Image (cartoon, helix red, strand yellow):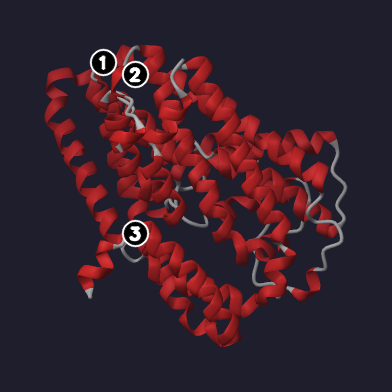
Amino acid sequence: MLRFWFAIPLWQRVIAALFLGIVTGYFWGPEAASIKWIGDFFIKAIKMLVVPLIFFSLVAGVAAIGDIRKLGSVGGRALFLFVITGQIAVWLGLFLGTMIKPGEGLDTSAIPRGETPPPNETTAIDMILSIVPDSPVQVMADVRVLPLIVFALLIGIGILMADEDGKPLAKIFDSGAIVMQKVTLIVMELTPFGVFALMAWVAGTLGLDALLALAKLVGLNYLGCLLIIIVMYSAMIKFIAKLPVVDFFRGIIDAIAVSYSTASSNATLPVTLRCTQRNLGVSTSVSSFVVSLGATINMNGTAMYLGLATLFGAQIFGVDLSWGDYFLISILATLAAIGAAGIPGAGLIMMALVFGAVDVPLETIAFVAGVDRIMDMMRTTTNVSGDAAVATTVAALTGEIDREEMISADDI
C-alpha cells in the first residue's frame, strides 16, 4: 500500500486531495471543521522549516558566488529585476481589479467572518529600521523575514571577504542547506493530508455558494498570474536573456508542478535549484544565490494579488480609493510581498499592512481566507517561475549559463 502511495507523484496526490476535500466538506457540512487540526498541523510543520531553510540556503548561495565582485554584479542585477517585476505585477493587479470590479454587488453577509488581525500601525521609518536586526536570534524566533535576509547576506559576504579562512564555514552552511532541503522533502509528504483537511473545512464551513461568490476573484487571480508568467517572464527570457522561451518553460516544468501542488516557494526550492542548474544550464553559484534569495523576496504573484485583493475589499465595503491610494498600494504591496514568507497562506498575513494604509476593512482578510489556498497555489507557481526567470536572465547577462544545456522536450 505504501509503495503504491509513494509511486504516485506528489503533485497528483495533492490535487486529488484538494478535490476530495471539497466533496467531503460539501457532504459533511460544518462538522468538517473537526479535522481542520490536521491542516493546522501541516502548516505548523511548514513554518518550522522557514527560518533554517532560508538562513542556510541564502548564506550558502552567497558563499557559493566565490568572489565579492561577482556578488555585486549578480546581486545588483537580481534585485533590480525583483523590484521592477514586482511593481509591474502590483499594477497589473490594480488594473484587473479596476476594470473588472470583482467585489461589486457581492453580499458579504452570507460569509461567516472570523477574527481579523489588528490594524498595522508600522510607519515607513519603522519598516526601514526593522530591516536591521537588534538580535539575530530574536529575529529567527519571531520569523521576521527581512532582517533575517539582511543577517544571512552579511554572513555570506563575511565568508567571501575571509577568503580561505571562510571556506570551512562555507562548507558547513552548504551542508546545512542540503540537509534542510532533504528535511523539507520529508515534511512535504504531509501535504495531501493537510490539503484534504483544509479544503474539507473550507467547503463545509463556507458552503459552495460562498465558493461560487468568490469565483470571480479566483479567476482574476489566475488570469493575472498567467499574464505575468506568459507575457512578462517570456519577454525577459526572449529579449533580455536572448534564450528560447519554450525551452525555458520545458526546463522548469517540474518546479511548476511542485509549486502549484505545495503552494510553498520554500518547499519548491530544491526542485527549482535542480531545474535551473540541470535543465537551464545556470551555474551553481548564480542559481544558489538568486533562487534562494528569490524564494524569500521575489513574490510577484503575491504582489499582484495584494493589489487585486485591496480593490476587492474596497469594492465590497464601498471604500473610494484615490490615485494617491493606488501609488501607496503599489509601494506597500511590493514591500509586503518581499516580507511574505514562502509558505502557504503567507499573503494573508501581509494583507493587514496594505489594507490598513488605505482604510480597507480588515474583515476582507477573513472573507477571502477560505479560498486563499486555491489562489495561493497559482501565486506560488508565479513566484517560483519568476525565480527561475530572474536566475536565468542574470546568468545570461553575466556569462554564467551553458546555453547548450537548455534541454529539449525529448530529454525531460
Q: Residue at x 46, y 51 (%)?
A: 260
Asked which secondary structure carries label 3, the reply is helix
Indicate left or right for 384 with 25 as reference. left
Q: Residues within 10 Å of mark 2 (few under 14, many from 20)?
A: many
Residue at which label 3 appears: 10
Residue 276, position as x, y percentages in the image:
33, 31
Residue 181, position as x, y percentages in the image:
26, 48
Residue at which label 2 appears: 71
Distance between mark 1 and mark 2 Cα atoms: 6 Å
Residue at which label 1 appears: 67
Q: Quadrant of the C terminus?
A: top left
> Looking at numbered disc 3 in the image, what kind of residue is underneath it?
Leu
Indicate left or right for 23 with 140 as reference. right
Q: Quadrant of residue 294?
A: top left
Pointer 1 or 3: first along the chain: 3
Q: Are marks 1 and 2 in contact (CB under 8 Å)?
A: yes
Q: Residue at x 63, y 30 (%)?
A: 87
Q: Residues within 10 Å of mark 3 (few under 14, many from 20)?
A: many
Q: Is residue 63 above or below residue 351?
A: above
Residue 82, position as x, y percentages in the image:
52, 28
> Looking at numbered disc 2 in the image, what kind of residue is underneath it?
Leu
Q: Is residue 234 above or below residue 268?
A: above
